[in-house]
Amino acid sequence: MNKIKNMALAALAVCIAAGFTACSKDEKIVEKEVPVVQDNNWSRYQTLVTDNVKQNKKHDKAILLVAFGSTWEQAFNTFDTTIEAYKAAFPNYDIFLSYSSAICINRAAAGENGVTRNYYAPPFWLNAFADKDVQYSEIVVQSLQVIPGEEYTRVINYIKDFANNANGDLDDSYLANVTLKLGVPLLQDSMEDVPEVAKQLHALYSEKVKEGVVAFMGHGNPDSYDTYKANVRYYELEIALQEYSPHYFVGTVDMMDNFKTDVLERMQAAGITGGKVYCHPLMSIDGDHGHNDMAGDDDDNWDGTKFTANEEGEVEDTSWKMFFQHMGYECNDETMIEKGLLELPTIRQVWMNHTQDAINGEPLDYYHSKNPE
């Protein structure tokens, strides 16, 4: 009896494993294919972005602006202004903006600084552009990075993965015919972009540099992430600016030998040991780095008489404002120029010129990287 009972239970188990399909001694067990329910963040985000594109599609061509991202309302407003400027300059294109930073995407959606915004990564937008109900004939991806460094490399790879149908879920016939183009970062070219940006920055701050130092704070990449050796653009920009005034300096928060301590050393070597120091973010937006690393009140490293630098020569836990203030300069809230580069129309125009150059140029050879020279 136990043997018969066990055999019955085993047969029942087989039927359950087969998804409750018909099961008899004369029939083979056939597993029923259970559809997979796509209930995850990726599919939800893709649906939201695709719906957005469908609702806002007005033209047959699109421009996707790709920024690293931010969680600050000032940055959100800057991106809004940038989108409107692009709509005015490129009336035959639909304009969209994405974040490449997952941290910024998640924290902006969570309302880290009191304002909630939903931004999504470039793959969602590119996939939406290829949706059967959309299928733009031309897609221009414009990098909003300042230098052609690590983040720009990610932009290139997004395009290459899209063009090569990395996930195998797009229409290959569409991908074979869509025109893809890429707009390069602000300081892509050392011979053209660097002098032009220096010219426009001096036009904006020529009066302030007569009063003292104007120090620009870029981001920079650590040596191990200095893709294409793009950090050199900061030195090149300082040299170009100093052709207008020796009181211009360009430092970074993350580039070896170009921290605020190195800027101070160059200032002192030039005989500038006091006076006003204006600080300005050399970033597309004035976000966390601008509000905190540059203009924050943090000076935990100051012991009342000196700072202690780390092994790389940087003074951590101290903003540019407090550092130069303790070093004897007139550096305070009034000398903080809290504007991102995209807030400056003449600088924003350089990015827009790159977009126009991309449109006028040949389609992107996406099998190869769009490397800077």
Image: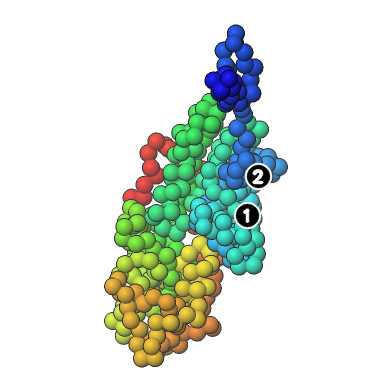
- Vertical order, 54 against 33 (above or below): below
Q: CA distance from mark 2 to mark 1?
A: 10 Å
Residue occupying the point 34% across, 74% down: 314
Residue occupying the point 54% across, 58% down: 104
Q: Is residue 82 left or right of residue 246?
A: right
Is label 2 in a helix, a strand or a loop?
helix
- Say which amino acid is labelled 1: Asn
Question: Circles 2 and 1: CB distance less than 8 Å?
Answer: yes
- Vertical order, 92 against 328 (above or below): above
Is label 1 in a helix, a strand or a loop?
loop
Give the residue at mark 2.
48
Q: Nearer the viewer, residue 211 or 176?
A: 176
The circle drawn on residue 118 is 1
| Visible residue check, residue 210 | no
Q: Is residue 370 left or right of residue 26?
A: left
Q: Nearer the viewer, residue 152 or 169?
A: 169
Q: Nearer the viewer, residue 130 or 192?
A: 130
